[in-house]
Amino acid sequence: QVQLVESGGGLVQPGGSLRLSCAASISIFRFSLMGWYRQTPGKGRELVATMDLDSTIKYGNSVKGRFIISRDSAKNTIDLQMNSLNPEDTAHYYCYAVQRPKGWDIERYWGPGTQVTVSS
């Protein structure tokens, strides 16, 4: 059973920074892709950033130049450094992972999420 657990969310002032972490119950290198999505009542689910096994990274347009996704192999986590935060970044952030096992259907997994609130 695959489990994803996010941490690091909280309240931060505009212009501040937060670092989110997603811990997986299996090696992060068993996923073909991992990343972050976020949800708000106004925008719904939105891509934040993803990274595949070839280290190809994709960022959502609204976070380009401000957020950085990375792997921490020692901690077995996928991390998201969020800088220059603004109130529009307020959302519930979800860790996402994909497995593409040979001869099996694609498996998609989601963590329970962590809340990020940007407010003065």
Image: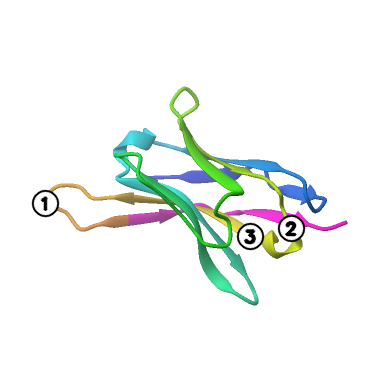
* Residue numbers of the magenta segment: 108-120
Specify whether residue 112 is painted magenta. Answer: yes
The outermost residue toward the left is 103
Q: Position of 120 compared to 105: left or right?
A: right
Percent position (x, y) of residue 36? 50, 52
Q: Specify the amino acid type for callout 2.
A: Asn
Residue that mark 2 sits on: 86
Tell me the residue at 82%/51% (across/down). Answer: 13
Is the residue marked by circle 3 packed among few (<14), some (14-19), or many (20+) residues within 10 Å? some
Percent position (x, y) of residue 5? 54, 44
Q: Position of 41 compared to 22: left or right?
A: right
Residue that mark 3 sits on: 92
Q: Position of 66 compared to 109: left or right?
A: right
Percent position (x, y) of residue 108? 35, 56
Is the residue marked by circle 2 packed among few (<14), some (14-19), or many (20+) residues within 10 Å? some
Residue that mark 1 sits on: 103
Nearest to the eye among marks 1 and 2: give it.
Answer: 2
Tell me the residue at 71%/52% (across/down). Answer: 85
Q: Quick check: marks 1 and 2 in contact, CB under 8 Å?
A: no
Viewer-proximal residue, 55 or 37?
55
> What's the magenta bit mostly, secondary-structure-wise?
strand
The outermost residue toward the bottom is 42
Question: Label 1 to label 3, Cα distance in Å?
Answer: 34 Å
- Whether residue 58 is visible here, answered yes or no, is yes
Which element is circle 2 on? Answer: loop
Which element is circle 1 on? Answer: loop
Question: Label 1 to label 2, Cα distance in Å?
Answer: 44 Å
Is the residue marked by circle 1 packed among few (<14), some (14-19), or many (20+) residues within 10 Å? few
Q: Quick check: marks 3 and 2 in contact, CB under 8 Å?
A: no
* Residue 32 sits in quarter: top left
Which element is circle 3 on? Answer: strand
Specify whether residue 50 is painted magenta. Answer: no
